[in-house]
Amino acid sequence: MNLAMKDLRRQKVSFSATALGLGLLFAIVLAMGGIYRGLVEDATLLVDHLGADIWVVQRDTRGPFAERSTVPPALEDRLRAQAGVASARSFSTATIQRIVGVRSLRMTVVGLSWPEDKGQALPLVSGRHLRDPHREVIADRSLGLALGEILPLGDETFRVVGLTQGMLSSGGDGLVFSTELDARAILNWQAPEAKRVEREGRLARLAVTELDTLSNQDRLRDERFNPPTLAPFPANAILVNLRPGASIEEVQRGLEAWPDVTAYTAQEQRDLLLKGVVEKSRKQIGLFRALLAIVSGIVVTLILYNMTVAKTHDIALLKLLGARSSVVVKLVLNQGLLLGALGYGFAILIAKFLFPLFPRRVLLGPGEYLGVGMLVLILVTLASAAGIVRALRIPPTLILAG
Amino acid sequence: MEAVRAENLFKTYGHGATEVKALLGVSMVAHSGEVVALLGPSGSGKSTLLTGLGLLNPPEKGTIDLMGERVLEDGKAFGDLAALRRSRIGFVFQKSNLIPFLSAHENVRLILALNDQMGPETYTRSQELLEYLGVGNRSRHFPEELSGGEQQRVAIARALAPAPPLILADEPTAALDSQRGRAVMELFRKVAREQGTAVVVVTHDHRTLDVFDTIYEMEDGVLSRAEKTA
């Protein structure tokens, strides 16, 4: 006779409500782990996806994900000439916030190295990859853009030709992929008034040089004129892939001798990201999670202890009737395990249906579910122990006291 | 046959100025099929004797034999007292003390389950007992759905379920009106006669003393046999 179940059938509603409350607590413990995994996934997603062997960035910087890094696109040519290098491509990325229609969209623009990279490796959920070198983008679904929607960015408009899912930056913003040239144009866009002010500035600077001729002044006034002496828009990094058999360490060592750049392997760039962007969040989330686990433990202990106290009379009666201690232990432990199992079941349901609505990615794998499941099992077992100690101390003669 | 024999029981609570001698050399016997009443004022030691016989509160001195077998001697237990309680002693209390989350049927089957009897025969045994005690039609009901008299009948059925040689009842009619109280006492006599069980009842109700075969009176820890007047 399962006394625990028999008891619970008389208090289905209150037991279920208690389990739901616990489920919410367990769900938050689950979410903390999922948010951390989501952070790591988001932070390393681009590095992993771009598949470069070496990241070449501005000297003594940690790369485009950690801080501002600018390198001239012409660096590509110098790198291609290096022994062991198969390809080199510019890479630009930055987070921008624009008003699109009535929405304020925060997005991270990523440049793809056209024509080698048209986004073929991107996991599209609808649409297609880039076909034209200009005015096409692939956007993440989290941005709420529709396929075919026109996105005005800078002086240009871009058509959304493909949609991805779960492609987010380390800041949790949806990624927008364009060609590298378009990305640089978007990221370095200036308003017409800013351009006019810049032209006036150039004229003023020309006026104090020996080149201040009427013809030069006319050229500078022409808005289509771009002085050949000005550098093109910089990139944030150059991504290098090596020839088969080439040693990453050797090429990296060679590049380290260059005074204007720093070279990181993909793993180093990944580590930098995790240490820089994720480390503090990891500690914060870890501490918060530990606190939550302690709170959950205390709550479960109090609930199970009070459930046992509420059954003091029944337990005394069982003992008076000669019930073995194991009967009493089973009664308390089974209810603890049932409460834990039901609470954990609610937590899984919450995770399945509620977490996808969270603004940041909550990434839960089997390991996470198993880990929290084990935690719940340990918590309810320990919490039940408090109830069991109490139950075993109840004297059977309590019944005779009236 | 002697269902229970107590010899020279002594029990003291507290010590020094607060010392109370609850049992002072108490001896008694209850035979199979016999209904025994324990009378006495509050604080006379009746409940101490009952809990002693029920192996819940062993006396410091003296012996208790159940069905001719020594189970307690000078506070020392021979065997597992809890196991002896669940198999050889049935308890009935002032309040029915049924488990509130079990139906009448389940309350009776519970004691069988505690005695490791799980099979379908426990359903039959439980139903038979409930019908025997006149509450067969209430077997699916929970205690809160039963009247006080019905609850006591279910409690008696539970006490009888493992067919113990001894039933101990502590003021089982105190919460009932006189008519239902008398009905319960007569049930005890019926059970004793038909099941061969010895029933020891602590009671204050002098109107039902005619039901009992033997009457003991307790005062200040001393037990004496009283003459039946009715």
Image (tube, coloured by chain):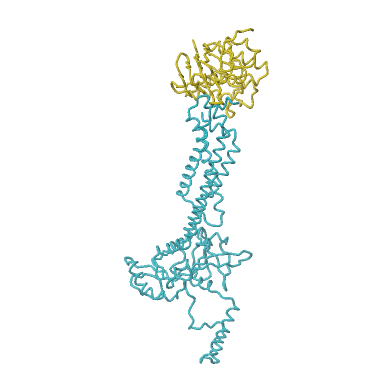
- Compared to residue B159, the image places residue A267 above or below, namely below
Chain whose colour in the figure is yellow: B
The chain drawn cyan is chain what?
A
**Which of the two residues, A366 or A268, is positioned nearer the viewer here?**
A268
Q: Residue furthest front?
A: B17
Q: Position of residue A12 (x, y in %)?
A: 59, 36
Name the residue at 66% across, 20% down: B176
Q: Residue at point 60% right, 38% down? A: A14
Task: Tell me where residue A312 sits by quadrant.
Answer: top right
Which is nearer the eye, B156 or A9?
A: B156
Q: Is residue A376 above or below residue A199?
A: above
In the displayed structure, B191 sits above or below A33; it is above
Numbered circles on residues, count: 0
Residue A137: x and y, percent? Answer: 52, 66
* Most distant residue in the left direction: A245
Question: How far across and how far down the image is residue A272, in percent?
Answer: 43, 64
Left or right of A265? Residue A199 is: right
In which image quadrant can residue B191 be found? Answer: top right
Report the residue at 57% width, 85% height from top.
Answer: A221
- Relative placement, left or right, of A63 versus A174 is left
Q: Is residue B147 left or right of residue B115?
A: right
Quadrant showing the C terminus of chain A: top right
Residue B228: x percent and y percent? Answer: 61, 8
Front in this rendered view, residue A312 or A273: A312
